[in-house]
Image (spheres, rainbow, N blue to C red):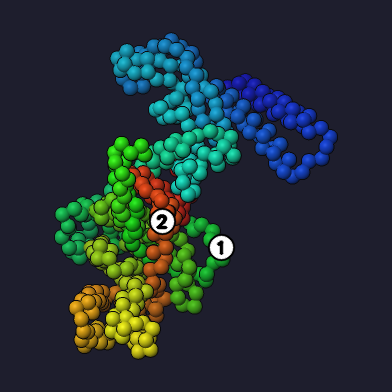
Amino acid sequence: MTPERKQALIGDALARVQEILETRLDAVGERTLTIDEIEDLVEEAGREAEHWLVGRLIDEQEPAPVNRVSCPRCHQPAFYKETVPSRLLTTHGEQTVRRRYYRCPACAVGFAPLDRVLDLGEGRRMTRRLRSWLARWACDEGSFAAIPPLLAELRGLVVSESTVERTTVEVGTALAASNRQAALAAMPDLNPELQAATPDPEPDAPPPLGLAPDAPPVPAPAPAARGRQRGKPVPGRLYLGMDGTSCPIRDVWRRDGTLGKLVCHGQETKIGMAFTTYQKDGLDEGIHTRAYVATLGKIAWFTVLMVALARAWGAFGAKELVVLGDGAAWIWNLTQRYFPKAVQILDLWHVLQRLQQVAAARFGSTTDPKAQAWLKNTRWRLENDHVDWILTDLRLWEPQGVAAQELRAEQLHFLEANQGRMRYGTYLEQGYYVGSGVVESSCKRVVQSRLHEAGMHWREHTAEAVLAIRAYLLSDRKHDLRAWA
């Protein structure tokens, strides 16, 4: 923009603002205003001035009118056909943009040079900022339908529920694809030291991931403000957590019933988390920083995302790496393969729930005084590294009845398989978390509070897009979705 055009624009803008304010203030007259009336006046005047300025600046970007331009695809001559007015939604209101439309005989396609100048994207009639707002709000609020009235109130814009959903899916799909590409690009062949500790891959496992155990840690993202801090951050200690929860996915279906009845099934969503903690009185307490990944995809893709998250947070250079999880075998298989040096901790509360089942079968009820005494003694044993005593006690128990015998066999097998992850006395001395409540709460934060409310059901690709956005927004980082909008 030349100095002359810049000064002309500033002069026109000042004149327009003065005109808007004079009109608004004349309508008020000499009466006093309440604070609500002041807010309304400023909002309306500001919105009108912003709308005018956006329109004027768009007009300033229009290339000089010529009859022939170079085609952006084949670079052959394209010829002016007509000037087409089109609707463009911006964060400052709806604009009518007059676009000079050209057609390329070689490609047999048309285009408007102004779209390239404005970086609108092919066929886009909404700015990136507005698209990112829609995607963000749609993943925060309880439904896509909640966004149109909110946008109308805040910005005076009219959009449909279907537009909100379509935009969210497009942004989330682009974000998910970007996450996968970045994760794969950061992972060459496995380090020989890690390769030696890694079992043969499963048939559907992803290609080996390059992770150097002695790599320097990458600084974690700056923590978001989360109210009162608990103690001081623990230096050099990183937690990883993994869990799964169900998401209601529907089979192919139409609202008009032409494809039959609605049929839904629960599909597991795998969630991964990296976090650091504060410490108080020698025990880890409260979250300092956190980040999430989530996917409905197979374990192979989750593995790629999880290991990439761990690497980005310095897992292979951390002084202490701790993995928390429940009894799901896939969690510990993944951990053993990619994080063999980590301290593995089985959720204490998960173990206690299993022992309550044993007490109910052994004593008839968990409220029985003998059951209460046994549970109290068993918990003391767990918290003092006496897992051997519990295993011996279960082996000596001779239950009557098939159900009790099967329960004993199941729980004994589980405890034997996880014995090395149940040294709770040692973990507590080190100040570690021994419960995976932080990890389990991620299921509610990332999935259930948005995707598993009453009556909800999803197409898989829509749910995957929302999961990608929610994992991104709930992680401690600066959030800006425009790169994928």
Left or right: where 334 falls relative to 3: left
- Mark carried by residue 12: none
* Mark 1 neighbour class, 10 Å CA radius: few under 14, some 14 to 19, many 20 or more: few
The quadrant where residue 310 appears? bottom left
Secondary element type, mark 1: loop
Does 240 appear above or below 370? Answer: above
Between discs 1 and 2, the one toward the N terminus:
1
- Classify 71 as above or below 119: above
Q: Secondary structure at mark 2?
A: helix
Q: Residues within 10 Å of mark 2 (few under 14, many from 20)?
A: some
| Kind of residue at badge 2 | Gln
Q: Which residue is mark 1?
A: 227
Farthest top residue in view: 67
Q: Residue at label 2? A: 448
Location of residue 117 in the rendering, given as x and y in whole percent from the top left corner: 46, 25
Q: Is residue 279 left or right of residue 365?
A: right
Q: Looking at the image, is mark 1 or mark 2 nearer the viewer?
A: 2
**Which residue: 42% across, 54% down?**
454
Q: Residue at x 31, y 54 (%)?
A: 266
Q: Quadrant of the C terminus?
A: top left
Residue most extreme to the right: 30
Q: Is residue 131 above or below residue 57?
A: below
Of 224 and 109, nearer the camera is 109
In the image, 332: left or right of 165?
left
Residue nearest the observer in this picture, 28 or 368: 368
Q: Position of residue 135 (x, y in %)?
A: 45, 42
Question: Can residue 264 be seen from the camera position used here?
Answer: yes
